Image (cartoon, grey):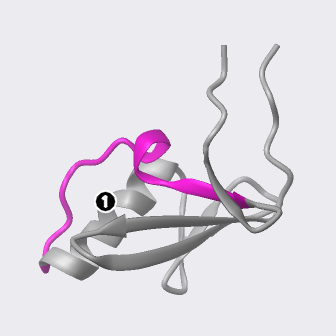
Amino acid sequence: RSKKIAVPAELQATYKNSTLVATIEANGSITYFGKSYKSLSAAASAAIGTVNGKPLPANGYTFWKQRVAGKLTALPRAK
């Protein structure tokens, strides 16, 4: 049985010493830096682009962590 993420959910990642924050919205989209993305990976790629100057492919499930009760935890994976 897979765990669900309560939305809206705050996501956070650290990339090259930069803290990046996104939100999973109620409709399932991910908002990063004011733009909506259809997947965690697309949002992660865009986030990397804000640090590197160009987007790079990224696995959104491993890139982002969710903030639950003040603690960062790995995103649950669908089984």
Q: Where residue 69 appears, x then y in whole percent?
A: 83, 63
* Residue sitting at x 22%, y 79%: 51
Instruction: Report the residue that reaches farthest toward the front.
Output: 71
Residue 76 among magenta residues: no
* Residue sitting at x 40%, y 51%: 63
* Residue sitting at x 62%, y 27%: 77
- Quickly name the residue at label 1: 45
* Residue sitting at x 83%, y 58%: 7
Residue 59 among magenta residues: yes
Question: If the image is split into quadrants, where does the C terminus sit?
Answer: top right
Q: Quadrant of residue 78?
A: top right
Query: In the image, 75: left or right of 54?
Result: right
Q: Where residue 1 appears, x then y in whole percent?
A: 82, 13
Q: Quadrant of residue 55?
A: bottom left
**Where 2 falls versus 12 (above or below)?**
above
User: Between residues 1 and 45, which one lies in front from this camera angle?
Assistant: 1
Which residues lie in the magenta part?
53-67
Secondary structure, mark 1, is helix
Q: Where residue 60 appears, x then y in whole percent?
A: 44, 47
Query: In the image, 63: left or right of 70?
Result: left
User: Between residues 34 and 2, which one lies in front from this camera angle?
Assistant: 2
Instruction: Report the residue that reaches farthest toward the left.
Output: 53
Number of marks = 1
Query: In the image, 42: left or right of 77?
Result: left
User: Between residues 35 and 53, which one lies in front from this camera angle?
Assistant: 53
Q: Amino acid at mark 1?
A: Ser
Q: Where residue 15 appears, x then y in whole percent?
A: 29, 67
